[in-house]
Amino acid sequence: MASSIQNNRVSPSGYCVCCRVCNMWCWRAFKWLPVLLIVSIVTWSYYAYVIQLCIFTIETTVQQCIYLVFYHILLIMFSWSYFKTIFADIKPIPDKYKLPESELEKLLSAESEDGQRAILENFAKDLPIVTRTMSGSVRYCNRCVLVKPDRAHHCSICSRCVLKMDHHCPWVNNCVCYHNYKFFMLFLGYALLYCLFVMSTCLPYFIRFWKVLANAQGEFGAAAGAGRYHIVFAFFVSLMFAISLGSLFGYHCYLVANNRTTLEAFRAPMFRGGADKNGFSIGAFNNFKEVFGNNPNLWMVPVFTSLGDGCQFPVRREHQLQTFTTPHEAHGYESMGITRSRSDLTDDSPVEASHIP
Ligand SMILES: [Zn+2]
Ligand SMILES: [Zn+2]
C-alpha cells in the first residue's frame, strides 16, 4: 500500500488544454445517455398507458379514473426518487480526514513502507476509524490525499472518495452512497411497483389482443388500431423491467437488512480482528432505520432521513475501540455507541455509549 503512495497532483503533460476540456465534456455528456434512455422509456410508457390504454381503449370512466390516479401516484413517487438519486447533494469527505501539506511531505519523503504506515497511523489516531486494509494499515487514498473514513471508497468514475460507497450506478449517473442510498432504494421500489401496475393492468388487453389476432377480427383490433401495439409493448417492457428490478430490489433489501454495501458484500470490511461481513450489522430493524431513519411517516418519502453523518457507524461490540461500562438492554442504533478515536480512549472520563448526531 504505502509503496504506491505518490504525489498524484502533478497533471500529465503532452495533452493540449483544449483537447482535455473537449474530452472531459464529451465524457460528461456520454455518461448521461443511460439516464436519457430511462427518461425516454418512461415518457413513451406514459403515452402508451395514459393515451392508448386509459383514454382510447378503456371504455368505462370509473375504471379510467382509478387507473389514472394510481398510475400518476406511482409515476410521481418513482420520478421523485429517481430525481433525488441523480441530483442528491453528495457531500465531500470532511477536511479532518485530509492530509495537510506538512504530513503529505513527510509521507512522500518517508524511506520505507513501515515509515509511511507509521505516519498514517499517527495522523489517524485522532480519527474515528476502525477499518483497515488487508495488511492492517490505515486506509489511505493517494488520489484524494486523505485517510478514508470507514466504508468510504474511491470512485474512479467520479474521481473522488465517497462516504459509505455502495456502487457507481450508470443508470443514475451518480455514486450510490450514504447520501442517496435511501433514495436509490425508493427508486427501485417505486419503479418495481410502477412496472407491476402497468403490467397487471395491461394484461387483460394484452390477452384480448392475442385473441383478436387469433380470430383476425373483433372490436378491440378494429377500435384500437395501431395503438394496440403500444399496449402490447408496454406489457412486455414492464414485464422485462419488473424482473430485473425485482431481483435488484430484493438483493438490496437483503443488503439493508444485513447492513452491507454492495462493495462489502463482495469483500467483507477488515477490522483489527480481521474481516467481518457483519461488522456493521446491529439487527435487521436497526439496520433498516440506519438507512430510512426513525420517523415511520418519512420512510417511504424521498427526503433524507438516514441516521449518522456518513463517517462513523455503529459497529459490533468486538470491533469497538472501547468497552462499555454499563450494560445496554437494547441493541439499537443509539445503544451501540460510536466509533471512538484512540486519543479519546486516553481520556479519564467514563466511556459510555454515545448518540450519533
Ligand atoms: Zn479518493
Ligand atoms: Zn461514482
Image (cartoon, grey):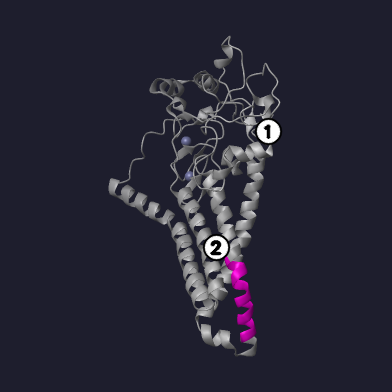
Residue 201 visible in the current orientation: yes
Q: CA distance from mark 2 to mark 1?
A: 44 Å
Which residue corresponds to mark 1? 276
Mark 2 CB in 8 Å range of ligand 2?
no
Q: Residue at the spot x=60%, y=38% of the render? A: 289
- Give the foreground label among 2 and 1: 2
Q: Quadrant of the N terminus?
A: top right
Q: Position of residue 119 (x, y in %)?
A: 50, 19
Q: Quadrant of residue 30?
A: bottom left
Residue that numbered label 2 is attached to: 70
Q: Is residue 161 above or below residue 56?
A: above
Which residue occupies the foreground of this view, 229 or 168? 229
Q: Quadrant of residue 233?
A: bottom right
Point 52% across, 82% down: residue: 224
Q: Are marks 2 and 1 in contact (CB under 8 Å)?
A: no
Stretch in magenta = 198-212
Residue type of the residue flagged with mark 2: Phe
Front residue of this view, candidates 111 and 165: 165
Which element type, helix, strand or loop, lies under badge 2? helix
Q: Nearer the viewer, residue 99 or 42?
A: 42
Q: What amino acid type is highlighted by mark number 1? A: Asp
Sequence-first disc among 2 and 1:
2
Mostly what secondary structure, the magenta segment? helix
User: Neighbour class for label 2 at 10 Å: few (<14), some, many (≥20)?
Assistant: few
- Going by the image, does 320 lie left or right of 17? right
Image: 340 above or below 16 = above
